């Protein structure tokens, strides 16, 4: 897969632009990147602050897989991002928090959002993998209410890296994993995810639509990407929706 990069100064949303291009036939490997977004969003349509200095991008994929396996793309992307950042910033403290966040010592530095469109009868038409990474943001770029829970790579490591160089490294890591995944399925990525995550073995609280719905120890992740959580009384629940909170990740 070769990267076909479309770089913009500003967009409402890289996902929206990528969707328009995918509907028009954009090839797999097409990447939309913007220096700023006016209307970026994460899961459940939460607003994602997207100022200058962050990496805001969306990748177009056209996998020939069963739609029930598409959640694995988010896991794959999380691995690629984590491996790329660990290499570029020489740190093993960059980790994946289930299901789609990238963390450093308890603070969020990025997130991934995957969306798909189905043919009426022929399976998946395309998958969009949106990625937001706080690369060169400074403290003043974060709203006051986010400064205790989010940070940037520049703040942490005191290094300037171009967003395009980070994107290229992530894309290269993603391509290697994607090729393996297309041949081997979940077996190609589950061990990597388990090695890079900060969720398994921790006490977590599961939230859905702002409501606390379960608490316990994160025991394992299934092959479909669901998280198995065991409460203190031994009750086990599997979650393929919602979010979790962890005291430190």
Image (tube, helix red, strand yellow):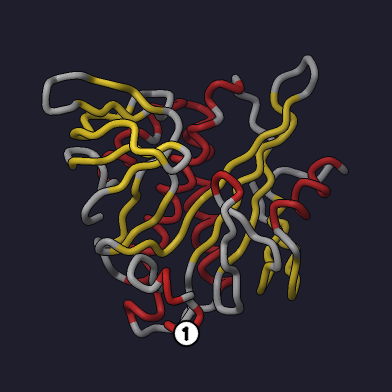
The residue closer to the viewer here, 182 or 69, is 69
Callout 1 secondary element: helix
> Which quarter of the picture shows residue 11?
bottom right
Residue at the extreme right of the image, as rendered: 24
Determine crowd level at label 1: few under 14, some 14-19, many 20+ residues with C-alpha closer than 10 A.
few
Name the residue located 43 percent from the left edge and 76 percent from the top edge.
Answer: 144
Across and down, in percent, residue 87 comes to: 35, 65
Across and down, in percent, residue 184 comes to: 45, 26
236 relative to 73, above or below: above
Name the residue located 69 percent from the left edge and 35 percent from the top edge.
Answer: 62
Name the residue located 42 percent from the left edge and 70 percent from the top edge.
Answer: 145
Q: Is residue 72 left or right of residue 87?
A: right
The residue closer to the viewer here, 33 or 189, is 33
94 relative to 155, above or below: above
In which quadrant of the rendered image does the C terminus lie? bottom left
Q: Which residue is mark 1?
A: 140
Q: Is residue 106 left or right of residue 44?
A: left
Name the residue located 47 percent from the left edge and 76 percent from the top edge.
Answer: 142
The residue closer to the viewer here, 228 or 245, is 245
Residue at the extreme front of the image, as rendered: 211
């Amino acid at each position: 897969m070769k990267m076909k990069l479309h770089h913009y100064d500003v967009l409402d949303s890289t996902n929206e632009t990528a969707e328009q291009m995918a509907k028009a036939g954009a090839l797999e490997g097409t990447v939309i990147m913007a220096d700023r977004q006016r209307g970026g969003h994460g899961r459940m349509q939460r607003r994602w602050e997207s100022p200058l200095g962050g990496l805001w991008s969306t990748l177009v994929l056209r996998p020939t897989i069963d739609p029930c396996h598409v959640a694995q793309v988010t896991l794959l992307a999380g691995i690629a991002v984590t491996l790329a950042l660990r290499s570029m910033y020489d740190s093993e403290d960059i980790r994946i928090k289930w299901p789609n966040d990238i963390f450093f010592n308890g603070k969020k530095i990025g997130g991934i959002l995957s969306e798909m469109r189905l043919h009426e009868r022929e399976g998946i038409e395309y998958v969009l993998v949106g990625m937001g990474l706080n690369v060169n943001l400074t403290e003043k770029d974060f709203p006051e209410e986010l400064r205790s829970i989010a940070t940037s790579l520049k703040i942490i490591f005191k290094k300037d890296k171009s967003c395009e160089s980070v994107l290229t490294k992530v894309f290269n890591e993603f391509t290697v994993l994607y090729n393996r995944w297309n041949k081997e399925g979940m077996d190609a990525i589950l061990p990597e995810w388990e090695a890079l995550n900060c969720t398994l073995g921790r006490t977590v609280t599961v939230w859905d639509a702002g409501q606390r719905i379960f608490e316990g120890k994160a025991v394992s992740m299934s092959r479909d990407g669901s998280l198995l959580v065991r409460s203190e009384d031994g009750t086990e629940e599997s979650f393929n929706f919602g979010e979790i909170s962890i005291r430190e990740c």
